[in-house]
């Protein structure tokens, strides 16, 4: 479990990552979280889950292992790519 300082640092790091991925160059973070949240909501709404399942199957196959933790990490990365799009 993260302490309060670690949690605040992770939040700041995430905002910096979002800023970098947003394409902004003006140094302003205003509205950045809202833009991110709106994009993720649209991606969640419009995701074709058959495509996600297909991509997960390919990712798990590419691990060439039966280690459940490795397979779960591969599946999670596919889900992140589908939901977060440009933001990761």
Image (cartoon, grey):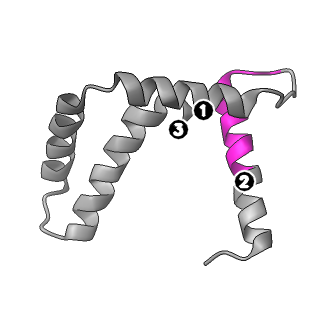
Q: Is residue 87 above or below residue 77?
A: above
Query: Of the numbered discs in the image, which one, if any, rests on residue 88?
Result: 3
Would you say residue 15 sits in the magenta stretch? yes
Would you say residue 22 sits in the magenta stretch? yes
Q: Residue at x 80, y 21 (%)?
A: 25
First of labels 1, 2 by sequence position: 2
Look at the numbered disc 3 and give the secondary structure of its residue.
loop
Q: Which segment is the magenta one?
A: 13-25
Look at the numbered disc 2 and give the secondary structure of its residue.
helix
Residue to which mark 2 is pinned:
11
Tell whether label 1 touches label 3 (CB within 8 Å): no
Asked if residue 86 can be seen in this view, the reply is no
Position of residue 47 measured from the top left corner of the image (x, y, whole percent):
32, 26
Query: Of the numbered discs in the image, which one, if any, rests on residue 84?
Result: none
Spatial CA span between label 1 and label 2? 14 Å
Spatial CA span between label 3 and label 2? 15 Å
Spatial CA span between label 3 and label 1? 13 Å
Q: Is residue 63 left or right of residue 19?
A: left
Q: Nearer the viewer, mark 3 or mark 2?
A: 2
Position of residue 1 measured from the top left corner of the image (x, y, whole percent):
60, 78
Residue 23 occupies quadrant = top right
Q: Is residue 10 above or below residue 39?
A: below
Position of residue 59 measured from the top left corner of the image (x, y, whole percent):
21, 46
Query: Quick one: label 3, few (<14), some, or many (20+) residues within 10 Å?
Result: few
Q: Nearer the viewer, mark 1 or mark 2?
A: 1
Query: Of the numbered discs in the image, which one, if any, rests on residue 37?
Result: 1
Towards the viewer: 40 or 12: 40
First of labels 3, 2 by sequence position: 2
First of labels 3, 1 by sequence position: 1
Q: Magenta part mainly helix, strand or loop?
A: helix
Q: Nearer the viewer, mark 3 or mark 1?
A: 1
């Amino acid at each position: 479990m993260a302490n309060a300082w670690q949690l605040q640092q992770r939040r700041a790091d995430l905002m910096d990552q979002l800023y970098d991925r947003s394409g902004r160059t003006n140094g302003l973070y205003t509205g950045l979280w809202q833009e991110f949240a709106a994009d993720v909501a649209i991606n969640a709404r419009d995701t074709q889950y058959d495509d996600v399942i297909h991509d997960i199957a390919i990712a798990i196959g590419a691990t060439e292992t039966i280690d459940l933790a490795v397979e779960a990490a591969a599946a999670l990365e596919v889900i992140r790519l589908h939901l977060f799009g440009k933001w990761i």
